[in-house]
Amino acid sequence: KIAQALLQQPSGASMIIYKLRDRNRAPLLASRFESLFQHNALSWQEREESTLQLFLTLSMSVAITVSLIILLAGFGIFNVLTMSVLAKIKEIAILRSMGYRRRDISAIFLWQGALIAAAGSVIGCLLGALMTWGVSHIPIHLRGLLYTNYFLVTWDWHHYLFATFLALVAVFIASYVPARRAAQLPPVVTIRGSR
């Protein structure tokens, strides 16, 4: 009453805040309260629309950044394995001259790539989870729409699944295509040219 008198505000409540268990019902209840009490009622989604739009923009930029990082890692895997296969052209030619079929040689490099992809995916996912856990324990005190004491981090298994899938695709292409191409070269020409 004293604050209202000092601010020359009419007596009575100037705002009523209603908490819900189901936050998604807020727009429905706001329109119901507005018609029931003949007073302006806003849901938290309407009141914090600009903040929610900011969070949507931030989550989209994070998704784009994560996708680009995973794509760059895929290109790195592709380059390393392609160079590994091309460095073994002489060995491929020797295997061909010993009677190995092209399919057998491709299978050798695919198995090598699969082992690298499996080990890399497990190590990468573990390191990613560890780093995500570390970031989620950085103290940050926010009060307002968001109430948190620590840095907010999204633990989304889709990121790990997408990274593993992309690594497997990159390893398959990087192992199969150069090995297949190298296996098609005539063994005599390859061995003679590598001296």
Image (cartoon, helix red, strand yellow):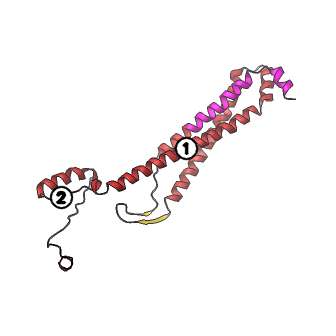
Q: N-terminal of the two: label 2 or label 1?
A: 2
The residue depicted at 69 percent of the width and 36 percent of the height is 81
Report if residue 21 lies within the magenta region. Answer: no
Which quarter of the figure has residue 106?
Answer: top right
Helix, strand or loop for disc 1 = helix
User: What amino acid is found at the position of numbered circle 2 in the picture?
Assistant: Asn
Question: Is 94 displayed left or right of 44 in the figure?
Answer: right
Give whichever of 45, 21 is nearer the camera.
45
Q: Whole-Å distance between the Cαs marked 2 and 1?
A: 45 Å
Helix, strand or loop for disc 2 = loop
Question: Is 15 displayed left or right of 68 in the figure?
Answer: left
Give whichever of 93, 55 is nearer the camera.
55
Residue 140 point in image, percent of width and height: 46, 65
Report if residue 179 lies within the magenta region. Answer: yes
Residue 22 point in image, percent of width and height: 27, 52
User: What amino acid is found at the position of numbered circle 1 in the picture?
Assistant: Leu
Q: Which mark is residue 68?
A: 1
Residue 145 point in image, percent of width and height: 34, 61
Q: Which mark is residue 76?
A: none
Judged by depth in the image, the label closer to the viewer, 2 or 1, is: 2
Which quarter of the figure has residue 164?
Answer: top right
Question: Is 14 displayed left or right of 65 in the figure?
Answer: left
The residue depicted at 16 percent of the width and 52 percent of the height is 32
The residue carrying mark 2 is: 40
Q: Which residues are magenta?
A: 166-195
